[in-house]
Image (spheres, rainbow, N blue to C red):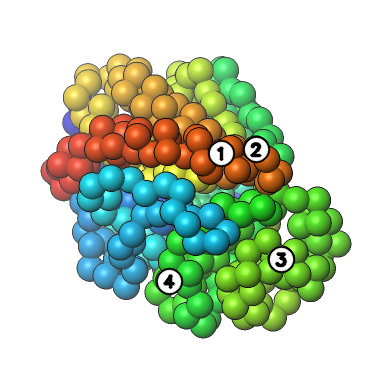
Amino acid sequence: MVLSGLTVTICGGATGGCAAALLLARAGARVTLLERVAEPRAIGAGIAIAENGLAVLESLGLGPALAVARPVTEVRIVDANGRTLLAPRGQPPRAVLLRRSTLQGMLLDAVANEPLIDRRFGTEVVRATTDGEVTARAETGEFSLRADLVIGADGVHSRVREGGNFGARVRSTGIRYVRTLLEADVATGTEAWTPAGLFGAFAVDGGTYAFASCGTSALGSALDAGDLTAFRTAWTRAYPPSARVLAGLKSFDELIQNEVIRVDCARWADGKLALLGDAAHAMAPNLGQGANSALVDGAVLLDELRRHDTVAAGLAAYQKRRRKAVKRVSDASSRLGKLAEVTHAVPRTMRDRLLMPVVGLFATTKATDLLLQEPTETLLAVGRSR
Ligand SMILES: Cc1cc2nc3c(=O)[nH]c(=O)nc-3n(C[C@H](O)[C@H](O)[C@H](O)COP(=O)(O)OP(=O)(O)OC[C@H]3O[C@@H](n4cnc5c(N)ncnc54)[C@H](O)[C@@H]3O)c2cc1C
């Protein structure tokens, strides 16, 4: 299908929505990008972008902007004493770490320079219907838009998903994470699985990105009470290297909190609606593939629309190519997340001594290919071809 003249409404202007907007607009589609947040630039803490996400971003000409990101030189999970629990054999796939605001900023700059994208920020999608109508609310009031294709890139609590029959399962995992950015260079450079859950601190552009799950009741209570001292104390007891990292926090409000929610959809398309990114497949963060998968979604969606004569046929092929591939990654991420949350001493010792060597046997090149979902050359070619 030639995309020139195709009208597309994209709901949600974060990683998935911006990348899809760029891919489709550069293929000739006329895109309207609706984003609830008026100034969606300064968001989040840090993010790891792996080979698959990098290929999509590079295909969009963002390679030079990505030069500020810090390369991941080693992939290794350690215990609280620094002993290696898991280290994939062979060369790990290429990956970088950067501030989320840096990633979002480069996508927004590219979107702003794309004449076929009409940006409407500060605009909240209220509902979407399978015939391609989207109703949204802006400062000036409510309005409706009709398009040949509507993409729900509006995250875990997607409004677009509510408008179609996607067979969605939205599950709360009960696992809580905190993330923060620190100005100082206090990276530990590894992810540690500790008696309190998982803790990592990695260098990003202009500082350190730290993240932690909060698997014990002491940490849960500290979060509920907004008590930074109790939070630091509990972490220092479980994992002494965390003390140096957390010392840089000035207030509790610098911690961004999330509960991990998983979304699985039986269908990714219904009528003129299609889902992409977390709206379709929010997953545990343990393999760092949520945003990367959202980027791959956009590239595959474009590829399949081009290969088929109608939007309906393109969407059916998109769903077929993506759903199973993402589910495999999402399942693996959940399993890894559960292992990281084993906090009691006996099962933790059994995990570390007996289970992790077995898990290590599966950390092969084949597993990496499944994780990355699509060949890098394919992803590069889709975004580059006009
Ligand atoms: C602790 C943690 C760490 C993570 N680390 C990584 C990592 O290292 N690498 C990785 O690849 N992934 C990671 N992820 C996952 C990643 O954050 C998500 O998968 C990714 O942000 C999904 O992008 P998205 O564009 O689909 O959705 P979102 O980022 O959720 O964006 C949705 C957008 O839609 C907008 N929106 C929502 N509702 C509406 C509405 N009604 N109208 C208009 N706009 C709306 C929102 O404002 C937002 O801008 C992590 C997740 C967590 C929780």
**Dot 4 lies on which element?**
strand
Residue 237 x, y percent position in the rendering:
71, 66
Residue 9 x, y percent position in the rendering:
44, 39
Which residue is found at the position 37% from the left and 49% from the top? 87
> Dividing the picture into quarters, in which one does residue 190 lie?
bottom left
Q: Closer to us: mark 4 or mark 1?
A: 1
Q: Which residue is mark 3?
A: 237
223 left or right of 369?
right
Q: Amino acid at mark 1?
A: Arg
Taking 325 as reference, is 238 above or below it?
Answer: below
Please state the total of marks drawn on the protein image.
4
- Disc number placed over residue 347 in the picture, else none: 2
Q: Amino acid at mark 2?
A: Pro
203 left or right of 244?
left
Residues under numbered marks 2 and 3 in contact, where contact means CB atoms less than 8 Å apart: no
Which residue is found at the position 48% from the left and 69% from the top? 188
